[in-house]
Image: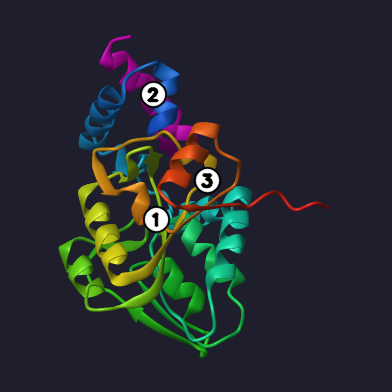
Amino acid sequence: MAQQERLQQMREWIKTTPEISLDQVMEEYRISRDTARRDLIALEQEGQIIRVKNGLIRVGTNTTVQYDRRTEQPEKNRIAKRAVRYVERNQTIILDAATTVARMTVHLPVQPLHIVTNSLAIVEQVEARPEIDLYVTGGKFDRHARSLVGIKTADDILNYQVDRVFLGACGLTEQGVFAENLEEAIVKKAMIRSAGEVIVLADRTKFEKRFLHKVCDLDQIDVLITDEQPTDSWQDWLREAAVLLEIAEEEQA
């Protein structure tokens, strides 16, 4: 299918679907990731869409509503609930801007805590909790992720030394953790440098996905929390890297 024909079909698609992932575009038109990105760039230049991490949103879409929908997915909620077990009284922790990490705020118990974050969604969740001391980075505002990103954000984070960092991942392979863009990768790397322990939250869809920007090797992770038992190969890689694997299984009714 020629690009112009695909673009016309996508113009009709976005009229009824306000948010479409890059993977959906690739699957629908059987095209490569690079071709899909070029199509999105063309639509953005027309003013039809706003390109965001892993896809697009229609111009005029309420990004806050779209963000909230992503955080409410059941697998993300299970992973977040499991991750909260690693939060201890009076700890200082970093919470990054991943939607799964943001979901942790729903399950945090009432206890003194110090949180450093670049996520405005997390700020909104905990600002009314007096037992939590909240530290927010500077940086450039990313509307889709509702976060602050870039070199300024990374520099701010490096001024802190924390007990644990809770990170999301765009992709995971045997080579390590990957981010969708450079600004996000820079911030995550700074968070890892500032933390005594690194805990990665990633659902099963993030496995075997590699992006251009690498964040860290597997052996820089202390704990990986996911929603489904990974393959035998993955379990071997994690053991070799001394990563503790936690499975957030579905709760029985």
User: Looking at the image, which residue is at 22% across and 54% down?
Assistant: 183
Q: Which residue is mark 1?
A: 221
The disc label shown at residue 203, or none: 3
Residue 228, percent across and down? 61, 42
On screen, residue 81 above or below 4: below
Q: What segment is highlighted magenta in the picture?
A: 1-21
Whether pointer 1 and pointer 2 mark residues with C-beta atoms closer than 8 Å, the reply is: no
Residues at marks 1 and 2, CA–CA distance in whole angstroms: 31 Å
Please, what secondary structure does the residue beneath circle 1 have? loop
As drawn, is 39 to the left or to the right of 229?
A: left
Q: Is residue 247 magenta?
A: no
Q: If you read the primary sequence from the N terminus, does the residue marked by circle 1 or circle 2 appear first? A: 2
| Amino acid type for the residue under numbered disc 2 | Met
Farthest-out residue, front: 240
For residue 118, which quarter of the picture?
bottom left
- Whether residue 51 is situated above or below residue 108 in the rendered picture: above
